[in-house]
Amino acid sequence: MPEEPKRRFSIIIPVLNEKKNLENLLPKLNAYRLIIIDDGSTDGTPELCLGKDNVLFIERGKKMGLVSAVLEGFRNLSSDDRYIVTIDSDSSHDPESIDSMIRYAESRKLDLLIGSRYVKGGSSEDSISRKLMSKSANILFRLAFSSRIRDATSGYRVYSRELADFIVSDNKIQAVSPSYAGQVDILRRALSANFKIEEFPIRFRKRGEGNSKLRTGDIFQYLSLVSRKGYLMRYVLVGISGVIVNEMLLKAFLGLIGNASEVIAVEASVISNFVLNDKITFRTTGNGSGKYFLRMLKYNVFNLGGVGINIAIFLTLINFSFNPLIANLFGIIVAFAFTYLTSISIVWRR
């Protein structure tokens, strides 16, 4: 292995009762500087790691969370670490990819390189149920945060020193979720702060010895994070408020101007949705009045497109003898997806 990369990065490995896996992994990492964060192992993991010249072993005594361990590693970096690698201890991440990932991150001047199962050249040996859960979580991430990252939950990563320091500092302002949800919490913050991020294909292997540490509570934390911090839930809530505006104005003007009240009600709800999404959902600032009204016009166009899609699907399904309410529901769902995806990619570019 080339000597230069070894002097400019450390590898962080969170562990909890992973002695058997580490017996296989550590000999492959003898040439590297390791920071091993242990959350109270009772299987002999500390005894295996202590005394190794290339290992900084930090014993925390109790389970505090995967990403909490990563942050602990960030706080214990060497002064000459320019990059930091995070890798699982269960043998699911192939250490032979480390040098290639470091060289790629350096050549592209990246702040975060994610080892990805879901880009071209990547693969996963996980069970079908775990693959389904993982892909569902990543689809939800892309929808919620308007991101093109395909493997947001991957823990095999290369961080720049600048991003690691930023995350440690930002964690003091608002704590990063300490468990698995923290992987996407870190990514969300890096995206918001405009750090340069890419993905790198990896082969994700079946874990070695032991059982996965993922628990039901971790899944709920993930869903909570995506709901609270992502755009999708706020977009839905704003959409509901638009329906209320539409109904109120329709009721108020229907007796005065007849069918023309429908046009007023629809346009008012569209404008209301745009203003609220701009301020609450996407929190856009400082675009100038010209660009603001141009984006509002685009949003109007996309909503008209959504209405057209809704009507087309409704009429098509009715023709195939679908129940009208079900046909309309399908139309609404597809129209919502169209409006949301086009809006975040064109009106609110992220």
Image (spheres, rainbow, N blue to C red):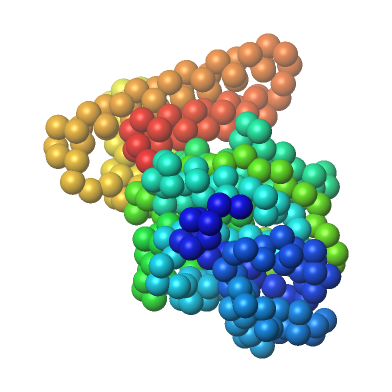
In the shown orientation, is residue 301 left or right of residue 74? left
37 up-or-down from 148: above or below? below
58 up-or-down from 348: above or below? below
Viewer-proximal residue among 2 and 301: 2
Viewer-proximal residue among 290 and 129: 129
Q: Is residue 28 visible?
A: yes
Provide residue 68's location: percent of width, then percent of height: 56, 73
Q: Residue furthest top?
A: 319
Q: Residue furthest bottom?
A: 61
118 up-or-down from 166: above or below? above
Q: Residue at x 14, y 37 (%)?
A: 289
Q: Residue at x 28, y 47 (%)?
A: 284
282 up-or-down from 309: above or below? below
Provide residue 139's location: percent of width, then percent of height: 60, 42
Q: Residue at x 66, y 88 (%)?
A: 61
In the shown orientation, is residue 347 left or right of residue 244? left
Provide residue 333's location: percent of width, then percent of height: 57, 32
Q: Is residue 258 visible?
A: no
Provide residue 103's location: percent of width, then percent of height: 50, 46
